[in-house]
Amino acid sequence: MTSPFEYLANLDKLIHEPARLALLTALSACESADFLSLRRLTGMSDGNLSVHLTKLEEAGLVNIQKQFIAKKPSTQLKITKKGLAAIQRHWEQLAAIKQSADAWEDDSAGK
């Protein structure tokens, strides 16, 4: 019999990584966000944030748009439909694992 804890190993590791989970969750709650807002929200460094956003962009989960506004660089980020579906599915999987873990009884505990 498979324990609910074994399902944790099957979660999408691209999304489950804490920084990327935070980014996708934040972007799923808004239409778009700028780089500086996400940096403040997550507490990540510029480099760390950039690396994680690039991985999410390569996977088609976020769109990154770089432009200049009043001669200053501006990076806008938006979750894609694929990204929104992925983060919603991920949270549903976590909720199901939690529910299963709460109800789980270790059959080997009494043996």
Image: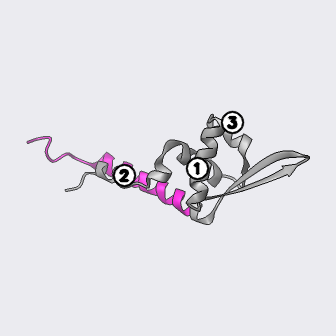
Identify the magenta region: 85-111
Neighbour class for label 2 at 10 Å: few (<14), some, many (≥20)? some
Mark 2 secondary-structure assignment: helix
Query: Is residue 68 or residue 79 the one in the foreground?
Result: 68
Task: Tell me which residue sits at (19%, 56%) in the image.
Answer: 1
Mark pair 2, 3: CA separation = 31 Å
Identify residue type, mark 3: Arg
Which is more toward the observer, 106 or 45? 45
User: Does residue 96 appear to the left or right of 35 in the view shown?
Assistant: left
**Element under disc 1:** helix
Q: Is residue 36 above or below residue 86?
A: above
Disc marking residue 97: 2
Q: Single out the residue that lies furthest toward the left.
A: 111
Crowd band around label 3 with a 10 angstrom C-alpha radius: few (<14), some (14–19), many (20+): few
Q: Which residue is mark 1?
A: 25
On-image quarter of the C terminus: top left
State the image coordinates of residue 39 (x, y, percent, origin top left). Answer: 67, 39
Q: Amino acid at mark 1?
A: Thr
Q: Report the residue marked by disc 3.
A: 40
Work out whether mark 2 precedes mark 3 in sequence or the reverse, and give the earlier one. 3
**Residue visible at 72% across and 45% down in the picture:** 35
Nearest to the eye among marks 3 and 1: give it.
3
The mark lying in front, picked from 2 and 3, is 3
